């Protein structure tokens, strides 16, 4: 359309010309949704439908027998759960697991990844083997190994303490030591995974930044503080979010194998408690209500973590 024709044409004709010039702009694209369909179906079947069913069951009293009736009780399950001392204790233990895992899932792996960045040859191979071996051991196998090491009578750790002239410690039988012990075992398993992510992110930093800083006379600490840590902030926040959301879940296998929630419920967290209600006492309503309480709390934490990531993560564009 020439300038003279544009001056003569009316507004409706110009709008039609602009629309015809971009025929595919508002067309619905079906292909991306076809690619996403298998993943969406799996999420629907294994996540959203069970979540909706758990929400429904949280308002009923049912012993999970197919022939038993489901009796509607409203908010009674929530009221009784929140009034139970073991529920408050489980929530506190969940918070303890989450906070206690941070040094081993974020701080120590970050330090190890930065400190070993310049290693090469055989030293790097030995370091990788030592760090990554715990990550590839099955949780149940790791739990059995630690149960043997921490046995109060003939465990290797117990015998070592005796050799040093120290008293025996019931790492898995004393309520004062059981919770820190399971937190340590869970964190020991996570160190390799976190170090792997930090090492990959650290290796992806543009080396020209480091060289420019060294030419300007920056010390190693200044390079870490002003270059490496800001560029590692997305990974730091990602692992922090994973620790907050999944740390207590990762400890479930060790609780189940090593302590069964004891001694005196000192290692029971919210996930083990809802499992007990569902599969030991067969109380589907209480188990579902405990799951909904956990879901609501961790959903708020996830939203807060996402806000922190958007607010403080620094990306090298």
Image (cartoon, helix red, strand yellow):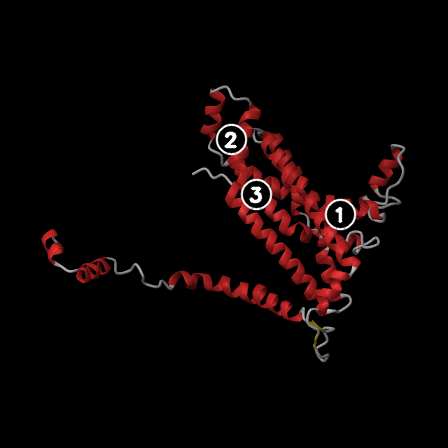
Residue 182, numbered label:
1
Residue 163, above or below 87: above
Q: Which of pointers 2 and 1 indicates the residue nearer the eye? A: 2
Residue 227, numbered label:
2
Q: Nearer the viewer, residue 115 or 127?
A: 115
User: Residue at 63% of width from left, 71% of height from top?
Assistant: 56
> Where residue 244 sits: x, y (%)?
64, 48
Residue 237, numbered label:
3
Assess whether mark 1 and mark 2 are in contact (beta carbons under 8 angstroms): no
> Where residue 264 sits: x, y (%)?
84, 54
Q: Residues within 10 Å of mark 2 (few under 14, many from 20)?
A: some
Give the secondary structure at mark 3.
Answer: helix
Whether residue 47 sits left or right of residue 96 in the image: it is left
Whether residue 214 sits left or right of residue 119 in the image: it is left
Q: Nearer the viewer, residue 108 or 233?
A: 233
> Where residue 205 sits: x, y (%)?
49, 34
> Where residue 308 sits: x, y (%)?
55, 45
Residue 60, numbered label:
none
Q: Residues within 10 Å of mark 1 (few under 14, many from 20)?
A: many
Inter-mark Cα distance, 2 to 1: 35 Å
Inter-mark Cα distance, 3 to 2: 16 Å
């Amino acid at each position: 359309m020439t300038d003279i024709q544009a001056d003569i044409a009316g507004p409706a004709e110009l709008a039609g010309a602009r629309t015809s010039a971009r025929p595919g702009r508002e067309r619905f694209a079906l292909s991306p949704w076809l690619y996403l369909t298998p993943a969406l179906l799996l999420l629907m079947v294994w996540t959203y439908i069970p979540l909706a069913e758990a929400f429904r069951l949280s308002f009923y009293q049912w012993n999970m027998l197919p022939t038993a009736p489901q009796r509607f009780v409203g908010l009674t399950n929530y009221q009784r759960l929140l009034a139970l001392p073991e529920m408050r204790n489980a929530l506190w233990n969940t918070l303890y697991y989450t906070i206690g895992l941070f040094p081993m899932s974020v701080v120590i792996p970050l330090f190890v990844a930065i400190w070993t960045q310049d290693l090469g040859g055989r030293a790097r191979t030995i370091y990788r083997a030592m760090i990554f071996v715990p990550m590839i051991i099955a949780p149940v196998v790791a739990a059995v190994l630690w149960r043997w090491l921490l046995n109060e009578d003939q465990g290797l750790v117990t015998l070592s303490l005796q050799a040093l002239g120290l008293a025996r410690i019931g790492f898995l039988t004393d309520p004062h030591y059981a919770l820190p012990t399971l937190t340590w075992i869970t964190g020991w398993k996570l160190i390799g995974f976190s170090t792997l992510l930090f090492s990959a992110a650290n290796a992806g930093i543009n080396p020209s930044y480091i060289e420019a800083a060294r030419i300007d006379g920056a010390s190693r600490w200044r390079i870490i503080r002003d270059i490496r840590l800001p560029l590692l902030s997305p990974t730091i926040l990602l692992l922090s979010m994973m620790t907050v959301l999944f740390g207590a879940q990762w400890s479930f296998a060790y609780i189940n194998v090593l302590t069964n929630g004891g001694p005196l419920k000192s290692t029971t967290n919210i996930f083990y408690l809802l499992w007990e209600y569902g599969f030991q006492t067969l109380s589907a309503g209480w188990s579902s209500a405990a799951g909904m309480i956990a879901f609501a709390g961790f959903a708020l934490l996830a939203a807060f973590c996402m806000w922190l990531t958007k607010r403080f993560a620094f990306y090298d564009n």
